[in-house]
Image (cartoon, rainbow, N blue to C red):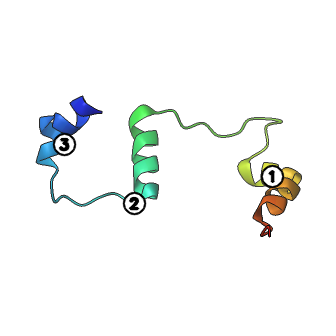
Amino acid sequence: MRDLFNSEFFKASLYQRVKSPTELIIGTLRTTGEYATPVGGEVGIYESWKRGGLWVKNYLIPRQ
């Protein structure tokens, strides 16, 4: 982290616009080319959430 914070790149970006999380993720995926769409029997994120959503709902219930 020290190397990152002391780098010229980091210092030169002072007062520059910060990307939104969406812009950061899309830019990273475009740069790395690591984006892959689900193939065949793989389920997407939404379908996985629907199948396993009950545990998510249980964690969102306020505890006393």
- Where, quadrant-wise, is the N terminus in this rendering? top left
Residue 32: x percent and y percent? 42, 32
Q: Which mark is residue 47?
A: 1
Q: Give the mark toward the camera: 1 or 2.
A: 2
- Where, quadrant-wise, is the C terminus in this rendering? bottom right
- Counting residues from the N terminus, which is met first, the one under dot 1 or under dot 2? 2
State how far apart marks 1 and 2 are (Cα).
26 Å
Decide if residue 2 is on the left or right side of residue 56: left
Q: Which mark is residue 20?
A: 2
Residue under numbered circle 3: 10
Residue at image location 16% in from the left, 50% down from the top: 13
Helix, strand or loop status at disc 3: helix
State how far apart marks 3 and 1 are (Cα).
40 Å
Helix, strand or loop status at disc 1: helix
Tell me if residue 46 comes above or below residue 64 in the rendering: above
* Amino acid type, callout 3: Phe
- Counting residues from the N terminus, which is met first, the one under dot 3 or under dot 1? 3
Residue 35: x percent and y percent? 54, 38
State how far apart marks 2 and 3 are (Cα).
18 Å
Decide if residue 61 is on the left or right side of residue 22: right
* Label 3, residues with CA under 10 Å away: few <14, some 14-19, many ≥20: few
